[in-house]
Image (cartoon, helix red, strand yellow):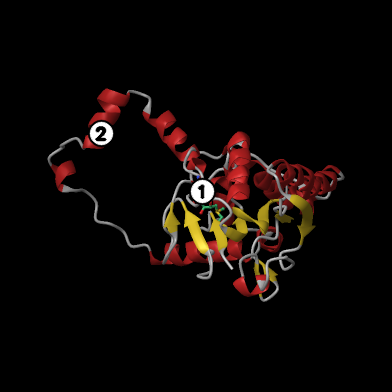
Amino acid sequence: MKLLNLGCGHRFHRDWVNVDFVSTGDGVIAHNLTKGIPFPDNQFDAVYHSHVLEHFARRDGEAFMKECFRVTKPGGIIRVAVPDLEGIAKEYIAQLDAVTAGNVDKIADYEWIMLELYDQAVRSRSGGDMAAYLFQDRVENLDYVYGRLGNEARQLREQHQNKKSKVTRKPKGSIRSLFRLPSFRGILKRYLLAGEEQPLAVGKFRMGGEIHQWMYDRFSLGRLLQESGYADVRKLSALESSIPGWPDYKLDAENNMVHKPDSLFMEATKPLR
Ligand SMILES: C[S@@+](CC[C@H](N)C(=O)[O-])C[C@H]1O[C@@H](n2cnc3c(N)ncnc32)[C@H](O)[C@@H]1O
């Protein structure tokens, strides 16, 4: 079986061909997927991507899905996981109803679901306000946040707390500051960029692959799969799949724990002809 995991990040299995912007581990191929998929037609029995499609502008997403179709073997499977717009929108309405009915205990949950809905699309610095929320010393609705984002949120918070406790203070001052020499960055900022530095930094960040540029629900993702050429579109759970041995790869869940519980999981098949 030839299996392809696109935008794998740090979650990959060595039985798969794994691709990401930068190589995140042994054998992970570094490639920008907006430039196409670097393999010939009809190569893979299964093509999978998780929480990648929403990082492309809508048009680029359509081109990317057509590329997935091209490299899938006839009879092969595509599996896509994305944040579930329908689930997030329903949760937002539920929390809005709760807070407007005067349920003050739900204000923190409401704040969080607003972040989930918007921050991932509008942020201009890594982690955005979601990370800032998660990294507060005290988070009053941690169980709710972990329930929404799964173990990954727990690990992120723990890593942040461990890092914080290890921080040592750097000695103040450097040779350059001692003799008051301007840095190259200082010169660039003062004379060449004159006010352009921040917009350039924001633009660079927003094109760097972290933010969400579009979102999908079971209708729009199903339609996109069909328009890309796939048939037999189905919505599944994290553990269900037509890919033989799927749970063993531990890509969407491990020990029955779903990595990204906010996800929509869908599969479809490339027709034989
Ligand atoms: C939210 S992470 C998901 C990682 C992994 N698939 C998972 O489910 O945990 C999105 C991944 O897509 C990658 N990515 C986004 N845009 C990309 C592009 N144009 N080319 C290659 N990789 C891209 C990012 O580098 C990142 O690793």
Query: Which residue lies at the image location 76% right of the left edge and 47% below the top edge?
Result: 222
- Distance from disc 1 to disc 2, alpha carbons, whole Å, reads 40 Å
Disc nearer the start of the sequence (1/2): 1
CA neighbours of label 2 inside 10 A, class few (<14), some (14 to 19), many (20+): few
Q: Is residue 157 visible?
A: no
Q: Is residue 16 above or below residue 248?
A: above
Q: Which mark is residue 37?
A: 1
Residue 119 in which image quadrant = top right
* Residue 209 numbered mark, or none: none
Q: Position of residue 217 (x, y in %)?
A: 75, 46
Compared across the picture, whether 258 is left or right of 96 comes to left
Q: Does the beta carbon at disc 1 come under 8 Å from ligand 1? A: no
Q: Percent x, y for residue 110?
A: 74, 48
Nearest the viewer among 104 and 223 is: 223
Q: What is the secondary structure assignment of the residue under circle 1? A: loop
Name the residue at 58% across, 56% down: 134
Three-letter residue code for mark 1: Ile
Where is residue 73? Give x, y as percent. Answer: 62, 56
Q: Position of residue 240 (x, y in %)?
A: 74, 67
The amino acid at mark 2 is Gly
- Respond yes or no on whether mark 2 lies under 8 Å from ligand 1: no
Pick out the residue farthest to the right.
101
Residue 65 visible in the displayed image: yes
Residue in the foreground of this view, choosing between 24 and 42: 42
Name the residue beneath numbered marker 2.
186
Number of numbered markers = 2
* Residue 80 relative to residue 122: left or right: right
Q: Secondary structure at mark 2?
A: helix
- Residue nearest the observer in this picture, 193 or 72: 72
Specify the quadrant that holds the N terminus. bottom right
